[in-house]
Amino acid sequence: TRHDVADRARWEARERGLAEEVAALREALDQKLAEQAECGVSVARCDAAIEAVEVRLAASAGAAELRSKLDALEQAGALSAAIAAALQESKARHEATASTFAAKQKERAAWVGAAAAAVHEAESEVERRQGAQRGAARLVSASSSLALHRSREREQCGRILDALADCRAAQRRHGDAVVQGEAEAGRLQLEVKGLQDQRARLELEVKLASSSRKFAEAAELSAELKALCVKLDGDEDVALQQQVLEQVETEKASLAAESAREAALQRELQQEQRSLDRRRFDLLLEHLEAVRAVLPEAEAAQAELLSAELEQSEAARHELMRRWAWDTRGRQKRPAGEEKEGEGEAAAKAAAATQKESKKARERASDEDRDASSRPAG
């Protein structure tokens, strides 16, 4: 294109130079014509003078001188005729040159017009290709932004998810400790209750032996009862049971603290996920617009892939709208009684438009494949 523009400028400069030469030749022709007219006037004046001289000198003795002057006059006439012939020849050459120049100028004008049309067409093609490149760059940027956002989302939510996993593991540990402590406390309580039941039975047997005057058996039972009371009073099971119950309460308090921490982490995770999903929603909108911009100019295989990407992005956008109760632009929906009537219709129209574009792209891809398959192999 730059070569064509430079060539056009060179031809325009050549055309201006030839136009100046034509103007100069025309000016010279006009001067020669004026000189020819003056020569004709001079010839007529000379003829008149000759006739007057011939009349005056007809009877004089200067006939020889007159003949010499007549010869000179004839030579001057011949010279004037030669000059007129040369002038006519120059005029013919000039007219031929002017005619050739006009034809070349017309041909050059047609060539310049064709070159200008070619330049305009090339500029239009360059602009179209640049637009396609800008659309492709926009699509690549939107896709890379989505991929980067997904990696950042995993990184930012991973910390909270790890903390939640640690919190739940701690809850399981504290819950197991509570269950084990309560089981141990129940076992110790059963042992103490068994000893207390045994003491009550021995006391009853001592009373029965005393009332039956079985003093030896009563003394033996009393000794056994006394040993059992000493064991109950100094038994470590009661203190151990109290210690176990205190540990159980401590574990229950830790379990409640971990539950509260888990709820706080869940709230933090929800807020972080909402913020990340809002950013992702904007990136999905940009990606959808970029795909719709390049889809009409895409080839068959590319159009099919772009249609698949379009459907995936649209599905992800509708999933975020359903999850957070957003409208089609990512704004929070109003309560049911205050919703605008057109929002549902707008969402339905957007989904229908997306499906229609995808269908058109698939049909165009199938048509191109069918044409390619029907085209002869050679």
Image (cartoon, rainbow, N blue to C red):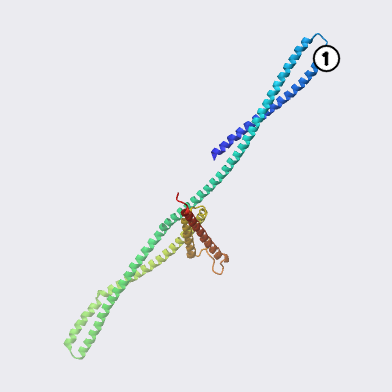
Q: Name the residue under label 1.
A: 55
Q: Is 269 in front, or is 243?
A: 269
Q: In this view, does 7 lie to the left or right of 315?
A: right
In the rendered view, tell whether residue 232 sits above or below residue 210: above
Residue closest to the eye, 154 or 45: 45
Quadrant of the rendering where the N terminus is positioned: top right
Number of on-image labels: 1
Left or right side of 341 for 183: left
Residue at image coords 29%, 76%: 186
Does any portion of residue 319 appear in the rendered image?
Answer: yes
The residue at 59%/39% (across/down) is: 111
The answer to whether residue 306 shows anywhere in this view is no
Front in this rendered view, residue 204 or 80: 80
- Residue 303 position, x and y percent, is 48, 55
Q: Which residue, as the protein is rendered here, is positioned at the far left?
A: 216
Amino acid under label 1? Val
Residue at 36 percent across and 66 percent down: it is 168
Quadrant of res 6: top right
Give the SS element for disc 1.
helix
Neighbours of disc 1 within 10 Å: few (<14), some (14-19), many (20+): few
Q: Where is residue 119 in the image (x, y as percent from the top left)?
A: 57, 42
Residue 31 in the image: x percent, y percent? Answer: 71, 25
Most distant residue in the bottom direction: 212
Q: Relative to 271, is 173 on the left or the right?
A: left
For the residue pair 22 and 346, the one nearer the viewer reads as: 22
Q: Report x, y in % for residue 104.
A: 62, 34
Left or right, 155 with respect to 41, comes to left
